[in-house]
Image: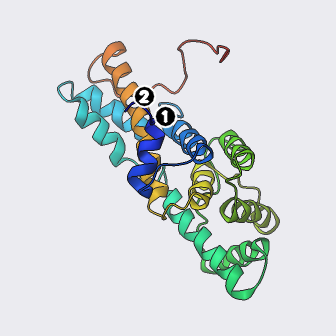
Amino acid sequence: MQRATFADTVFLLHRERLPNSHERRLLDAILTSCADHGSGAPSCATARLAASGNRESLSAAIAAGILAVGNDHGGAGAACMEMIAEGVALAREKGIALDEAARQIVDDSRVTKRRLPGMGHRVHSVDPRTAVLFDMAREEGVAGDGVAFMEGLDTAVREKIKPLPINIDGALAAILHDLGFPPAAGKLIFIVGRVAGLTAEVAEEYLREKPMRIRVPVQYDGVPPRSME
């Protein structure tokens, strides 16, 4: 409590050791990136609707939001980490570059019609969180095979299918892989970060809105941007 941060604690609970300063910065950034992305996201919308209909239980509303996290929202990170592990293993087994392994996985996905986890976004043509996280990973010396594979996958998808952004699930999957986390962490760490946003969404619903409201706000109307300084 006196010497460690919350990110340190999460890392310790999942990796059985404290992180170094570079690992801490990346995990902290991942948790921040997952916290909230607008009330229209399925987890936030579900939490707010539950809060609108049930004014007696804060925990029920938060739990409802968590239950909305699945393979299509916040949960693709785990599947993406499995794909990254597959790609890294393929590269080592065949003695090929990660870029070539990514191309082979894209080719296989086209044949099997398998969706590529961690790619695409319903709002962004480029997910702004991805570049920030990847740049930080390089600055801190954390970027490894996970980041390299996802960037190779991004290129292969553009060449063979169409431009699809690496989304936050893909970005956190790449970095969590490079931090040594197992695939399940792709979903678990997202949930840890998103709960912070859900608590704020539910609190706002209780404070600002009337019960039985079934329309979820999608436009931010809070405090305008301020300098971090």
Q: Is residue 71 visible?
A: no
Amino acid type for the residue under numbered disc 2: Val
Spatial CA distance of label 1 from label 2 is 7 Å
Q: Where is residue 127? Give x, y as percent.
A: 68, 43
Q: Where is residue 58? Give x, y as percent.
A: 24, 29
Q: Where is residue 106? Give x, y as percent.
A: 70, 73
* Left or right position of 156 against 41: right
**Farthest residue, direction left:** 56
The foreground one among 100 and 159 is 100
Task: Tell me the crowding category of disc 2: few under 14, some 14 to 19, or many 20 or more residues within 10 angstroms, Cα based.
Answer: some
In this figure, which residue is indicated by the disc labeled 1? Answer: 40
Tell me which numbered mark, 1 or 2, is placed earlier along the sequence: 1
Q: Quadrant of residue 81?
A: bottom right
In this figure, which residue is indicated by the disc labeled 2? Answer: 216
**Farthest residue, direction right:** 159
Amino acid type for the residue under numbered disc 1: Gly
